[in-house]
Image (cartoon, helix red, strand yellow):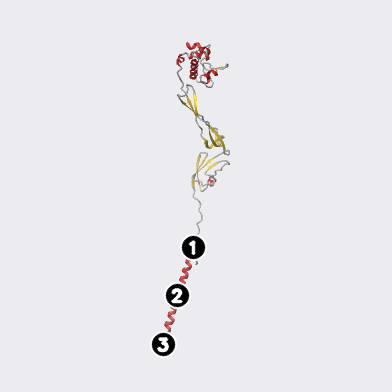
Amino acid sequence: MLWKPVLCKPLRCKPVRRASTASASALLAVSLLATACGGGSAAPGAAAAADPPAPSTPAPHRVVLVVDGKKTETMTTGTTVREVLAEAGVELGRHDLVKPAVDEPAGDVIKIMRLLSAPKLEVVRTPAKTVRKNSSSVPPWSEKVMREGRDGIKIVKWAYVPRKDRKGRTRKVKKVLAQKVKRKPVTRIVAVGPKSAGTGAAARLNWAGLAKCESGGNPRAVNPAGYYGLYQFSLPTWQSVGGTGKPSDASPGEQTYRAQLLYNKVNGRWQGQWPNCGRFLFS
């Protein structure tokens, strides 16, 4: 009777301890596996924590409005030009120019130009300038074109804008908005001969006396019969001594110079040129 209990105690206790340890290990492994795979009851809580925060209202900031050159400042929460202008109560006209554009970010400055009409494009010619350079290689009182000029061309963008007059009334004024040069003008270059020159013995004669008799000393005098200037040149005679245009349009110095050339050309036979007044050359 004593042997039976001694054999049963170790057989009943040892298997029970091993089964308990194995079960605990299995439960721990299953729990760790579920956590690693994203399962378990922790997933809903993790998803809720990842939701983004609700957007906040932008803080007010300062924007400078420049309308036709006049500056004002406004505090606004708008982010685009359209939103800023709406908050500031600024209305745009049909043709007004806005920079930046209405749907762009506002930035710190918004510029507005009021227009009364749609912008137009116009082709404008820029007249070529003329430069005269003294040259000893050109005959006295003469000119020679060394380079022909050419007008420039530019494209002008313009529109009508409102402007106040002295009485406070609004007037429509044409304003250039932008322009682009398509072709630069080319300067015309003219070589100009000396404004005085020696004509030998002819220069010592009394040319003022002759001019007083012929034209009353008036370099712009015109005779309806076809004679011009101080010495009453005819156009063919004037051209024969290098003159261009009308003698009455030339300077007094040039008229005197060409009269002296004419005197030398005819070898002093002044009678054929100034039959009535030529005697005053020797007075």
- Confirm whether residue 221 shows in the render: no
Category of crowding for the residue at label 2, using alpha-carbon neighbours closer than 10 angstroms: few (below 14), some (14–19), many (at least 20): few
Q: Amino acid at mark 3?
A: Trp
What x and y, as percent, mark residue 238?
53, 19
What x and y, as percent, mark residue 209?
49, 13
Under tag 1, what secondary structure?
Answer: helix
Residue holding disc 1: 46
Q: Earlier in the sequence, mark 3 or mark 1?
A: 3
Residue holding disc 2: 22
Residue positioned 47% across, 68% down in the render: 33
What x and y, as percent, mark residue 165?
55, 33
Category of crowding for the residue at label 3, using alpha-carbon neighbours closer than 10 angstroms: few (below 14), some (14–19), many (at least 20): few
- Residue occupying the far bottom of the picture: 1
Under tag 2, what secondary structure?
Answer: helix
- Report, in whole angstroms, how far the alpha carbon at label 1 lies from the one at label 2: 32 Å
Category of crowding for the residue at label 1, using alpha-carbon neighbours closer than 10 angstroms: few (below 14), some (14–19), many (at least 20): few
Query: Quick one: 273 or 45, which is closer to the camera?
Result: 273
Q: Disc 3 vs disc 2: Cβ atoms closer than 8 Å? A: no
Q: Earlier in the sequence, mark 3 or mark 2?
A: 3
Establish if 17 lies above or below 165: below
Report the quarter where the N terminus lies.
bottom left
Q: Amino acid at mark 2?
A: Ala
Residue positioned 46% across, 70% down in the render: 29
Residue 3: numbered disc: 3
Residue 70: numbered disc: none
What x and y, as percent, mark residue 204?
45, 14
Establish if 134 lies above or below 157: above
